[in-house]
Image (tube, grey):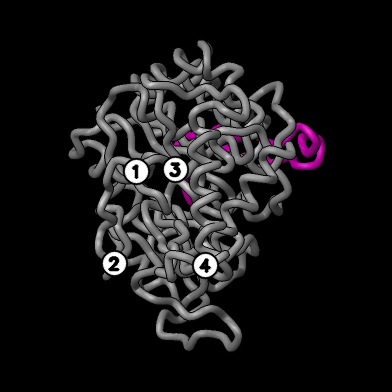
């Protein structure tokens, strides 16, 4: 018997046509759709390979409702479908290699979970990129203070490094004794105090260190069951819910804490902008995606007729492309660079791996 794969699809405000296009691209494999509770009555999509998660949650960008909905989707899939492997997707994702290649990859890899994640405390720059939203509840004065300290530490317009499907700020060298440098030291010290609980309790301690990572994981059934079992216990059930962008912290930390074997994510994530949002993929990005070795990519435009979407679908044998690969980059679009897209080994092409040192 072959590898039985089920996809979990998290949808909210996206056009129904984009959702339908992705579901059709994955057919005949099963897709479990979680549709935001506020949209449940507005999207009536029927496909032979599609089922809906009942009693859907209200979701929002990076809030607890979204994280709860992901876990609910995994649980529903485990209860209803006898699958071997679960892959989480969004409507802005598309397969970029045939599903047969994806299935063979899962069978050959000696890992339990495919996910891109890193320790928050692996170095000072990573710590300051994510620490302000790791140890304090969002929408609090303490949270806003640490976020401002983050700006002091990095300075204006710090460079971004794309690493393990995340965007990390990098602090540029500066003279040691200047007001700006002293502000950076103060920001680092205050964030360290927050990590030690000086500004309020958080779920982390010696036995549970925070990770940060991309939300879009894949996992074998036993790994999904392990994650679901752990998520019902403390601190997972309540200790994370007030964090900002909680899905990127809870899921990455939960995956790391399972003690299972973790491999590189199945996704290629487009380059992030200065606000930490992935940019929309264009035809100019497709050669790097094709060479990158991943099986899915995001963030595609949500218009079904988009040229990059059409080309990705052609790659997996779903539909003819309406645009040639050699098309010139549209005027005004951000230029693709090889280092902006991750390789199958998890590091940006042409960019040295980070030297991870204990803090």
- If you read the primary sequence from the N terminus, does the residue marked by circle 1 or circle 2 appear first? 1
Q: Along the line of sight, which residue is nearer the eye, 350 or 78? A: 350
Q: Mark 4: few, some, or many residues within 10 Å (few <14, many ≥20)?
A: few
C-alpha gap between disc 1 and disc 3 = 13 Å
Is residue 311 highlighted in magenta?
no
Residue plotted at (45% across, 40% down)? 212
4 or 1: mark nearer the eye? 4
Left/right placement of residue 319 relative to residue 122 reads right
Q: Position of residue 328 (x, y in %)?
A: 48, 88
Query: CA–CA distance between discs 1 and 2?
Result: 18 Å
Mark 1 lies on residue = 122
Report helix, strand or loop for mark 2: loop
Task: Check if mark 2's residue and mark 3's residue have beta carbons within 8 Å.
Answer: no
Residue 276 visible? The answer is no
Quadrant in which residue 276 is drawn:
bottom right
Marks 4 & 1, CB-CB < 8 Å contact? no
Residue at 29% across, 67% down: 351
- Distance from Cα at disc 4 to Cα at disc 3: 34 Å
The circle drawn on residue 351 is: 2
């Amino acid at each position: 018997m072959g590898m039985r794969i089920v996809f979990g699809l998290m949808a909210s405000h996206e056009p129904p046509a984009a959702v339908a296009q992705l579901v059709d691209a994955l057919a005949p494999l099963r897709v479990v759709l979680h549709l935001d509770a506020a949209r449940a009555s507005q999207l009536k999509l029927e496909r032979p390979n599609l089922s809906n998660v009942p009693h859907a949650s209200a979701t929002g960008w990076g809030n607890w409702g979204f994280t709860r909905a992901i876990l609910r989707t995994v649980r529903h899939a485990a209860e209803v479908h006898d699958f071997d492997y679960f892959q989480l997707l969004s409507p802005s994702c598309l397969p970029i290699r045939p599903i047969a290649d994806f299935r063979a990859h899962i069978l050959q890899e000696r890992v339990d979970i495919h996910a891109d994640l890193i320790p928050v405390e692996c170095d000072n720059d990573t710590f300051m990129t994510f620490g302000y939203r790791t140890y304090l509840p969002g929408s609090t004065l303490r949270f806003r203070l640490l976020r401002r300290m983050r700006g002091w530490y990095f300075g204006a317009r710090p460079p971004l490094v794309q690493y393990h499907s995340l965007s990390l700020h990098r602090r540029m060298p500066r003279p040691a004794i200047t007001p700006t440098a002293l502000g950076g030291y103060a920001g680092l010290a205050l964030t360290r105090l927050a990590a030690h609980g000086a500004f309020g309790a958080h779920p982390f301690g010696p036995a549970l260190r925070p990770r940060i990572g991309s939300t879009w994981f894949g996992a074998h059934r036993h790994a999904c069951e392990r994650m679901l079992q752990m998520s019902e216990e403390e601190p997972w059930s309540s200790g994370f819910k007030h964090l900002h962008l909680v899905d990127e912290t809870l899921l990455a930390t939960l995956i790391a804490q399972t003690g299972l074997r973790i491999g590189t994510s199945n996704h290629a994530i487009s380059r992030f902008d200065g606000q930490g949002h992935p940019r929309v993929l264009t035809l100019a990005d497709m050669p790097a995606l094709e060479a990158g070795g991943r099986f899915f990519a995001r963030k595609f435009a949500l218009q079904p007729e988009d040229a990059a979407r059409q080309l990705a679908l052609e790659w997996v044998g779903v539909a003819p492309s309406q645009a040639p690969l050699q098309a010139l980059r549209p005027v005004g679009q951000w230029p693709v660079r090889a280092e902006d897209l991750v390789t199958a080994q998890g590091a940006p092409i042409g960019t040295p791996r980070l030297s991870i040192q204990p803090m």
